[in-house]
Image: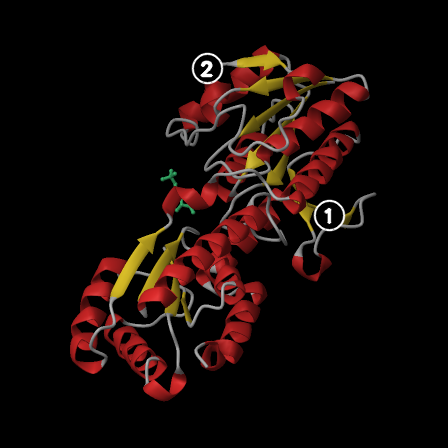
Amino acid sequence: MRIGVLTSGGDSPGMNAAIRSIVKVGVGRGHEVLGVQNGWAGVLAAEARPLTLADVDGISRMGGTVLGSARSKIFPTVEGQRQARERVKQLGLDGLVVIGGNGSLTGAHELGRSDAPCKIVGLAASIDNDVGHSGLAIGVDTAVNTIVEACDRISDTAAAHRRVFIVEVMGRNCGYLAMRSGVAAEADAILYAEKQIGEDELVEKLRTLISSSFAAARHKKRVLIVKAEGVKVKTAALVERLGKHLETEVPGVDVRETILGHVVRGGSPTATDRVIAQRLGFSAVAALEEGAHDLMLSWEPPGGFGEKTADPSVRRVGLQDMIDETKRVLDGTSAVTQARLKLLAQVEGLLAL
Ligand code: F6P
């Protein structure tokens, strides 16, 4: 087979390990592997070249993606899809592995659902962990560890000055990164959009939390609030409003903000991300060899959803099923989101103790 591989959307640590695995397994089994540059934009421009074992040697430890990534505006259009089908045929691909988040995998489904130019399989890769029926997408573990490390550093200096820090983390509309890293970093509060709460109520809650945290008897040295970027209230607005209250309520205590932004997306992938990426890559080649199409290889999907594979941690999930579940994850109706909210509600009152 001639197998194409591309990375699309926001890059995530571990994408390179997945590319390496696809090349190692693909070439090792006698296939030709073509690396498509810059995601769907590269498909439209037919920018692809054969990848050798030497090309992928040592790339597993690198963050970002050696193939480049992009968010193409043309690809999702009818004309973009028509052009993409043509280019895939020109490239002579028998199979295409798409490594990306829910937007990129939705694009893969659109391209492959009628008049498919080749077999298409996806690998969930997004730091946001918002891909439906995926337990842990490629990049999430690294992002969580990066956030925790940053929060630990901030905690050192915050404690030295008895300060409040609001640390904003990526995740788009999904609070998973904030929830998981907040618990690990001993945050006093975790703010996420899935818990819909108005600005005034939020300020009141934080004000009470901060005042009680700095009560003399508590001997508390810092307050750490981890906030998901999806929360509507701007971090700067929170800092300003809380700062005004604290001037009189706990004089001498400052509120500061740190927006981690793209720091969260970069860096060398953790061993967990490398292993997940490699095993998903291996399973992708195996799936294409079996003629599989229009599906995603998923790492430990909640509830064991999907079709079993030779790898006990990897399941095959239809791309349409992924799209439907992603909507539920984001609008809060998924059992996964409900379970996350329930768990956080149980510990919420305990965080600031
Ligand atoms: O989807 C990954 C992600 O990093 C989100 O967490 C974030 O909201 C978005 O991408 C940022 O995208 P860009 O780098 O295109 O601004």
Residue 330 screen position, x and y as percent: 46, 58
Answer whether residue 129 is visible to the viewer in this image: no
Residue 238 screen position, x and y as percent: 24, 65
Among the 4 quarters of the image, the one containing residue 201: bottom left
Compared with 68, 313 (above or below) is below
Is 157 positioned to the left or the right of 347 in the image? left
In the rendered view, how is the structure colored? secondary structure
- Residue that appears at 53% across and 75% down: 342
In this figure, which residue is indicated by the disc labeled 1?
Answer: 315
Along the line of sight, the residue nearer the viewer: 123 or 213: 213
Of labels 1 and 2, earlier in sequence is 2
Q: Is mark 1 within 8 Å of ligand 1?
A: no
Q: Name the element at disc 2.
A: loop
Residue type marked 1? Arg
Between the C-alphas of marks 1 and 2, the distance is 32 Å
Residue 112 screen position, x and y as percent: 59, 31
- Residue that appears at 60% across and 37% down: 14
Q: Name the element at disc 1.
A: strand
Res 45 label: 2
Mark 1–mark 2 contact, CB under 8 Å?
Answer: no
Residue type marked 2? Ala
Among the 4 quarters of the image, the one containing residue 194: bottom left
Residue projecting furthest to the front = 160
Along the line of sight, the residue nearer the viewer: 350 or 191: 350
Res 74 label: none
